[in-house]
């Protein structure tokens, strides 16, 4: 890499660290090119990105960002997975790491919060933003249907009583 390319890469990576909802750092030593391509495609489909960066350049890019606390994670062969949705990157990385022992989660950051490997794994178990929206919408709609049922119940009960009296009168 030439000096200008490095400067451009650091600037781009700095913007990524500032704009991302979450960043996950993992080791990938021993992973094949096919495995890495599969990992990248899964992350891209979920709305995230995976980058392999030189540790020294990543540490420089972290300076002045909220995620500066994760600079100690950049040792060895590391990759960076990030997404704007705070749940997407951890979820995809942890799911992929379950099936591939070459990917080892080291930690990450979510805003100003520095996460260790266990925190990233627990973050991955949370539902995504779309799932939470669907649950919230379902919870909002449920009381409305219950109210409609309660309001309609007395009228239907009255109709049954009148129907019973009408049948009784016809029988007599």
Image: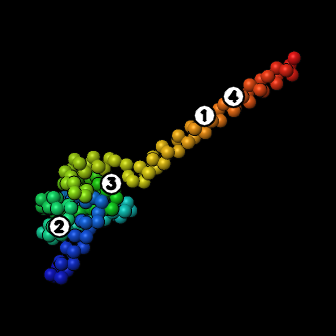
The residue indicated by pointer 3 is 87
Using a 10 Å C-alpha cutoff, classify the residue at mark 4 as few (fewer than 14 neighbours), some (14 to 19) or many (20 or more): few
Using a 10 Å C-alpha cutoff, classify the residue at mark 2 as few (fewer than 14 neighbours), some (14 to 19) or many (20 or more): few
Contact, CB < 8 Å: mark 1 with mark 4? no
Contact, CB < 8 Å: mark 3 with mark 1? no
The quarter holding residue 83 reads bottom left
- The chosen color scheme is rainbow
Q: Which of marks 4 and 3 is in front?
A: 4
**Residue that protrudes farthest toward the top in the picture:** 172
Residue 84: image location, x then y, percent: 33, 62
Q: How far apart are marks 3 and 2 (CA)?
A: 23 Å
Q: Residue at x 25, y 58 (%)?
A: 111
Q: Distance between the residues labelled 4 and 2?
A: 68 Å
Q: Earlier in the sequence, mark 3 or mark 2?
A: 2
The quarter holding residue 170 reads top right
Q: Is mark 2 on a helix, strand or loop?
A: loop
Q: Distance between the residues labelled 4 and 3?
A: 49 Å
Q: Residue at x 77, y 26 (%)?
A: 162
The residue indicated by pointer 1 is 150
Q: Which of marks 4 and 3 is nearer the N terminus?
A: 3
Q: Distance between the residues labelled 3 and 1?
A: 39 Å
Q: Which residue is drawn at 34% across and 58% down?
A: 85
Please determine whether, in this image, residue 4 is positioned above or below residue 120.
below
Please determine whether, in this image, residue 143 is positioned above or below residue 45.
above
Q: In this view of the protein, which residue sits in the foreground, 97 or 153?
A: 153
Using a 10 Å C-alpha cutoff, classify the residue at mark 3 as few (fewer than 14 neighbours), some (14 to 19) or many (20 or more): many
């Amino acid at each position: 890499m030439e000096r200008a390319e490095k400067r451009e890469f650091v600037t781009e990576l700095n913007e990524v660290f500032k704009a991302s909802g979450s960043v996950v750092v993992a080791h990938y030593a021993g992973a094949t090119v096919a495995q890495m391509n599969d990992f990248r495609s899964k992350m891209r489909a979920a709305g995230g990105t995976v980058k392999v960066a030189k540790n020294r350049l990543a540490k420089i890019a972290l300076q002045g960002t909220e995620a500066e606390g994760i600079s100690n994670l950049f040792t060895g062969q590391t990759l960076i997975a990030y997404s704007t949705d705070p749940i997407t990157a951890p979820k995809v990385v942890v799911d992929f790491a379950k099936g591939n022992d070459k990917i080892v989660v080291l930690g990450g950051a979510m805003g100003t919060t520095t996460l260790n490997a266990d925190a990233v794994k627990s973050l991955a178990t949370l539902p995504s933003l779309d799932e939470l929206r669907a649950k919230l919408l379902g919870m909002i709609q449920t009381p409305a249907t219950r109210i409609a049922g309660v309001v309609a119940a007395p009228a239907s009960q009255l109709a049954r009583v009148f129907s019973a009296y009408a049948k009784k009168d016809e029988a007599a």
